[in-house]
Image: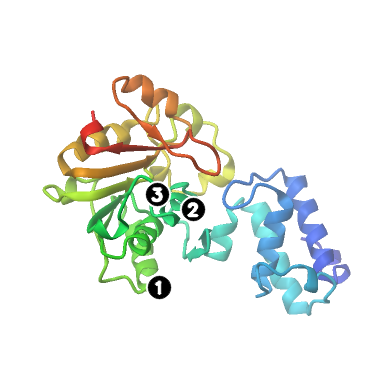
Amino acid sequence: MTEQAHTELQTLRDLLRYAVSRFNEAGLFFGHGSDNAWDEAVYLLLHSLHLPLDRLEPFLDARLTAPERDSALKVIDRRVTERLPAAYLTHEAWLGEHCFYVDERVIVPRSFIAELLSEQLEPWLDDPYAVTRAIDVCTGSGCLAILTALAFPNARVDAVDLSPDALAVARRNVADYGMEDQVRLIHSDLMAGVAGERYDLIISNPPYVNAESMATLPEEYRREPEMALAGGEDGLDLVRILLRQAKEQLNPGGLMVVEIGHNREALEAAFPQTPFTWLETSAGNEFVFLLRHDELP
């Protein structure tokens, strides 16, 4: 960050051009909310200047005060030099219209399950109000547990995670949404800590990155907790356990919805007799499967 930047960049338009150039020059990786340098620069600058995130045009040629410019340049510099995902710089992550607090203790939320919950899992669930018990396994920041509680207002939702740090972040988000009475946070290795409980709905976005991909992760992903990413040699270590546990803990007629990244081929090879239903998301139908109780292996 040069002295020239502090003196010559006067408007938001100037800063945006500068940020995009810095991001492209540094070869940053984008995958935590945006997929290109322009969108990431717009988000970071609007956030740092306390401007509406959906209103860029009216402010493009507004001149910045010296403290505003200093603050914005610090954010740009940290994104480049520390390779931190934008969400860790702003301490917020968005799933649709819902915002959640995040920091380095949790993975940055980006689950396709959020899209499905916004539609209350239609057409797979006939009556959202009939769901009275649900669980979010590997809850992380608690975002999917909260979205589950919003989608199914009669459900008591258990949110489990092995990481005490992640549960601390989840506790903050549950409190922010005023859902302490509906969402119960539990320290647990998958569903071991809720053995004997039965659920109408099990959802999970577990660690699923395989060993080969873990070895080549971009720097931005290496800023996230490794235990929230690594899924073993083929990425399916935790999914195998979850399928076993669900057989005992999913109610008859209940649904299990799990996100597994790019592991569809490996999963179908591992469970060739299991009739997985692959759910359509904005990225296609390769990433999230659904099983009913009687379909579980």
Q: Residue placed at 67% from the left, 67% from the top?
A: 54
Q: Secondary structure at mark 1?
A: helix
Q: Position of residue 217 (x, y in %)?
A: 54, 36
Residue 133 higher or lower than 232, as above or below:
below
Say the numbered circle drawn on residue 176: 1
Estimate the spatial distance between the alpha carbons at disc 1 and disc 2, rounded to whole Å.
17 Å
The residue lying toward the viewer, choosing from 81 and 85, is 85
Q: CA distance from mark 3 to mark 1?
A: 27 Å
Task: Judge depth for marks 3 and 2 and give the one in front.
Answer: 3
Q: Mark 1 or mark 2, which has the lower sequence index?
A: 2
Do residues under tags 1 and 2 come within 8 Å of each other at their CB atoms? no
Query: Residue 103: x and y, percent?
Result: 47, 60
Which mark is first along the chain, 1 or 3? 3
Q: Please give the label number shown on residue 184.
A: none
- Tell me if residue 272 comes above or below residue 188 in the rendering: above
Query: Residue at the spot x=76%, y=57% of the render?
Result: 19
Residue identified by numbered label 2: 108
The local crowd at label 1, few if under 14, some if 14 to 19, many if 20 or more residues have their Cα within 10 Å, is few
Gap in angstroms between the C-alphas marked 3 and 2: 26 Å
Q: Position of residue 233 (x, y in %)?
A: 39, 26
- Amino acid under label 3? Glu
Q: Amino acid at mark 2?
A: Val
Q: Tag 2 or tag 3, which sits nearer the N-term?
A: 2
Q: On the rendered structure, is 133 left or right of 110?
A: left
Amino acid tagged 1: Asp
Q: Which residue is mark 3?
A: 122
SS category of the residue bearing label 3: loop
- Quadrant of the rendered structure where residue 187 is? bottom left
Secondary structure, mark 2, is loop
